[in-house]
Amino acid sequence: MQIKEDIRIKQIGNESILVYNDGNNLDYTRIISLNQSAALLIGESMGKEFTVQHWAHRLAENYGIDKTRAMSDAQTLVDKLKQAGVLCERI
Amino acid sequence: MGQLIIPNKVFFSHIQGEIKAGNSVRIPVKGNSMLPLIRPGTDDIELSPLNKRSIEKGNIVLAQTEDGRYLVHRIEKVEGEVVFIRGDGNVSARETCSINNIFAQVTGIFRKGKKIKKISCQWKFAQYCWPSSPLLRRICLRVFRRFQCLAQRTKCE
């Protein structure tokens, strides 16, 4: 899967957010706020293919958590992003 | 779905950066100071980079006033390096800022899925026909608010 091309990651003060680019405007009326780990994973994955396993591996590597928890956290993030329409699946 | 609260200064200095980079942005509206053209709650505005004709009487701009506040108000007059701005919904309050502290112009208003452009009749009406006199403005705003209340009541019934 991949982050959609019209999604941008931005830093406002201490906040990392996702904004939608509709082609003409960066839309700051509907933004998604990210925590530190989500910002890291999404920032690294912009314009690239990734899997839940890849994200789980990066979480375990960066935060020293066990694989089961990393997998569960990565899956939760993917589910939330899918629900928000941020991800697209390659067929 | 929650609401992320970002201090005005932090938010607008970020927006300033986006505009400088040549991007247009869409942001939500707060406050009544640009009524009746720009309405809080229902409207979003489109901010775009400045061009040669942006800093002219009648245009709506994002400016930082001398006391550090960021405002989206209409230019009333330009005197050398000083720009006088005033909200359409303000009866008599006016602000001044340096010409260098105007960062963006409003080029569109989004309301109920439609975009009100600068060339629209509604925009031109607010630009050329909205009264400048405090007394007339007070009366017009009162009439507008009365209509808004009536429209809301009709919706509820």
Image (tube, grey):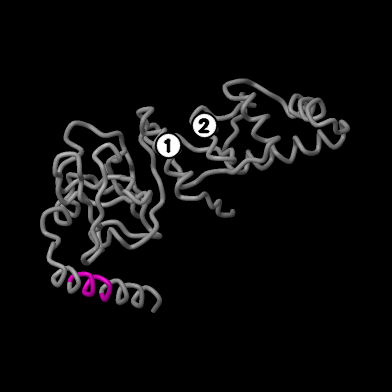
Residue B78 shown left or right of residue A10 in the figure? left
What's the residue at 87%, 35% (across, down)? A68
Judge left or right: residue B122 versus residue B15: left
- Image coordinates of residue B83 in percent, x first then y, are 20, 45
Number of other residues with Cα within 10 Å of mark 2, as a class: few under 14, some 14 to 19, many 20 or more: some
Residue A69, percent across and down? 85, 37
What residue is at 75 percent from the left and 37 percent from the top?
A: A75
For the residues bearing labels 1 and 2, Cβ distance under 8 angstroms: yes
Q: State the CA–CA distance, disc 1 to disc 2.
A: 8 Å
Tell me where the magenta segment starts and ends, as one range. Answer: B140-146
Is A69 left or right of A24, judged from the image as shown? Answer: right
Q: Nearer the viewer, residue A91 or A30?
A: A30
Residue type, mark 1 in image: Leu
Q: Position of residue B103 (x, y in %)?
A: 31, 38
Badge 2 sits on which subunit?
Answer: A
Q: Chain of mark 1?
A: A
Is the residue A36 above or below the residue B40 in the image? above
**B9 or A24: nearer the viewer:** B9
Q: Residue furthest top?
A: A48
Q: Nearer the viewer, residue B70 or A73?
A: B70
Query: Total number of numbered labels?
Result: 2
Above/below status of A12 relative to A89: below
Q: Which mark is residue B111?
A: none
- What residue did someone put label 1 on? A26
Q: Quadrant of residue A42?
A: top right
Secondary structure found at label 1: strand
Magenta highlight on residue B143 = yes
* The stretch drawn in magenta includes residue A27: no
In the rendered image of this protein, does residue B81 appear above or below residue B125? above
Amino acid type of the residue tagged 2 in the rendering: Arg
Q: Give the residue pinned by disc 2.
A: A8
